[in-house]
Image: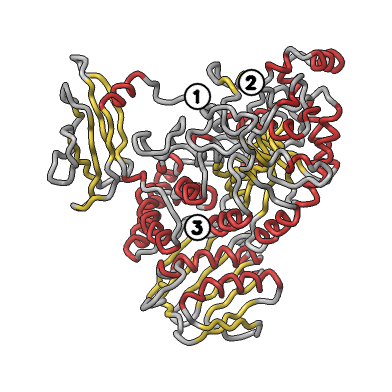
Amino acid sequence: MKRLITACMLLIAFAAHSQTSRQTGIAIIPEPVSLTRTEGFFVLPKEELTLRISNGAEVANVASYLKKKLAVTQTQVNVSTSSTGGSIQLLLVSDENAELDSEGYKLSITPKTVVIKARQPAGLFYGVQTLLQLFPKEIESNKAEDVKWAVPCVEITDYPRFGWRGLMFDVSRHFFTKDDVKKYIDEMVKYKFNLLHLHLADDEGWRVEIKSLPKLTEVGAWRVNKTGYFGNFTPPTPNEPKNYGGFYTQDDIRELVKYAKDRFVNILPEIDVPGHSLAAIASYPELSCTPGADKYVVRSGEQIMDWSHGAPPIALVDNTLCPANEKVYDFMDKVITELAQLFPFEYIHLGGDECPKNFWAKNDSIKALMQREGLKTMEEVQSYFEKRVEKIVESKGKKFMGWDEILEGGLSPTAAVMSWRGIKGGIEAAKTQHEVVMSPTTFAYLDYMQGDPAIEPRVYATLRLNKSYEFDPLPEGVDKKYIKGGQANLWTEQVYNMRHLEYMMWPRGLAIAESVWSPKEKKNWDYFFGKVEKHFKRFDEAQVKYSPSAYDPIISTGVTADRQLQINLSTEVSGLDIYYTFDNSFPDNFYPKYTAPLVAPKDAVMLKMITYRDGKPIGRLINYPIKDLQDKIQKSPGRAQQGK
C-alpha cells in the first residue's frame, strides 16, 4: 500500500509540474530535473548589463558564448570577474551544490538577476543553454527588432541522467565540410549533447588525412559523383571523373577538436574495419585477401552487397581487410597512431559491423590462419582481427570500441560495445561487464524515414518521432554502471546536403536529447510534443530545417471480408482531423472527415489526404496511388536491416 501511495504522489507531482509548464509557456528540451515557476520576469536592460563570472579560461569561454548569443538583443554585455554585482552571473561553487555532478547546474532567475551556479564550467554551459531557451524565440535569429527581451522567473536544478549523450555524423558516405561539422556541433549543444561520433571512413570515402599513408586521401577520398537512390546506381566506368569527395587535413581535425572542446563536446573518431573498407583497399590493394583488388575503386553507390539472405551480407566485391595479412596490422598501427595524436578523447571506434565473410571462406591464407590459431568459424577469424587491433589501440593509450558484431566469436574483456542492432547486444555486453553505449535502430537511427514512403525520401525503414521518444538507454535488469549512455546515428547514404541533414535530424534529435538527459519519470509524449512545436518556431528563427512528419497521417491497409482494400488512418499527434478524397480533387476541411476505415471505390486511382487542427491545415497534402496501397498489403510490416 505504501508503494501505491508513493507512486500516486509522484504521478500527481509530475502532472502538476507539466500543467504549470504548459500554462507558463515554458518549453525546455531536454526537460530539467526540477523546475519551479516564480513570479515575474527578468527584463534585459536596453543599454548595457554586467555579466559577472568566476575566474578561469573555460568560464570565460562560456561567457563569450553567451555574449555572442545576446548580441542580437543589441544590449551591450560587459564581462567582469569582480566579487559582487552583475545582472547575469556565471559562478563556480562547491559545497552548496554537492547534489550536482560535473555537468549539473542551478539556474535562479528573479526580476533583478539571472544566476547560474555549477561545480564545473560544463554545468555553466548547460545552464546557459537552458537560459537561452527561456528567452523569446527571436534569440535564435540573426536580426530581431521590437522584441521585449523578457525571461520568466524560475528556479531550476538540473543534471544529466547519462554522461554519454551522442550524435553520430557519417561524413564518409557524403562529404561535409569543416564548417558543416561546426554547424552540426552548434545545433547539438543547444540540446545538451556532449559527444560527436565522426564516421570517418567507409566504402564511399576516407575523410581524415593520415600522413604516413597519403594514398588514403589522394585516392580514397574521391569517387564518381552520382545522384538518385544510393545503392542502386550504375557502376562507375573508367572514364567517369572521380571528382566528388574531400577530406579533413590534420589541421582541420585539430580545429574541430578545439571548436568542440570549447562547447564541452568530445569527438569520437571511427574508422570502420575490417568490413566497409573499400576506400582503403582502393588506395592500398595489398590490404585485401582477394586477387584483382587493384581494380577496385571507391564506391559511388552501386550495389556491392547481396542482402537477400540477411546479415551478414554476401559480398559481390570484397570490401574487407585481410585478417591473415600482416601488412594490415602495420596499416592499422599507422592509422591508429595518427588518430590517437589528433583526437584527445579516450576511445577510438573501429567499427566491426556487417563484415561479409564469403571471400574469407575461400581464401587459402585465411584457412592457414585458422589452422595456425585454432579458429573454427569466420566469426572467430573476425574476433582474432578485433583483438589484435584492440592491442594496437591500447598501445596508444586509448580504449577500443566497436559495433555489437564484435561480440561474435569472443571479445576482449576491455572492449566497449556500441549496440545498434536493437538493445540485445548491449544487454549481453553489459551482463558480461563491458561498457556499453546504446544506439539501436529501433529508436535512434535518424536516417530512417519519419513517415510514410508516399511523402518521405525513401529508405528501407521508418522511425517516427513518438517511437524515438520511447528510447531508454538503460534496459530493465541491467547494471547502470556498464551503460555509459546513448546516442542517435545519422547515416548519410541518402543525405546529400546540410538542409536535408537538418530535416532528418530534427525533431527526432530532440526526442533522443530528452531520453539521455532527463529523468525517466519526467518523460511524457503529449507534453513533449507541445514543447517540440514551440521549438519548431525557434528553428524557423534560426533558419534550421526540420521535419513536419509528425503531423502526417499514419497509413495501414488490410482486406475486408469480401476481399476489398481497406484503408486505416491514424495520427501520431492527438487533436488532428484527417480529410480525404478519392476523386482526384484536393481535400480541405469541407471534404469527408476520416472517422472509420475506408474502402476504396472500385475504379479509384488516388487517395488524397491532409490533416487539420482547429480548422487550419497543419499536415502536408499526401497523394497515395491506390496501387501502392494495395501493394502495402503484400509487404511485411518491416524489412530486415540492410546496411547502416
Tell me the distance, in whole angstroms, between the alpha carbons under discs 2 and 3: 49 Å
The x and y percentages for residue 351 are: 68, 35
Q: Earlier in the sequence, mark 2 or mark 1?
A: 2
Report the residue at 80% width, 40% height from top. 393
Q: Tell me the kind of residue under disc 1.
A: Ala
> Mark 2 against mark 3, which lies toward the viewer?
2
- Give the class, few, some or many, for how many residues have Cα within 10 Å of label 2's Cα (few <14, many ≥20): some
Query: The residue tagged with tag 1: helix, strand or loop?
Result: loop
Tell me the distance, in whole angstroms, between the alpha carbons under discs 3 and 1: 38 Å
User: Where on the picture, by quarter, is residue 395?
Assistant: top right
Query: The residue tagged with tag 3: helix, strand or loop?
Result: loop
Q: Mark 3 points at which residue?
A: 33
Quadrant location, the C terminus: top right
Q: Is residue 417 above or below residue 618?
A: above
The x and y percentages for residue 422 are: 54, 31
Report the residue at 48% width, 68% height from top. 132
Q: Tell me the kind of residue under disc 2.
A: Ala
Quadrant location, the N terminus: top left
Q: Mark 2 points at which residue?
A: 315
Q: Earlier in the sequence, mark 3 or mark 1?
A: 3
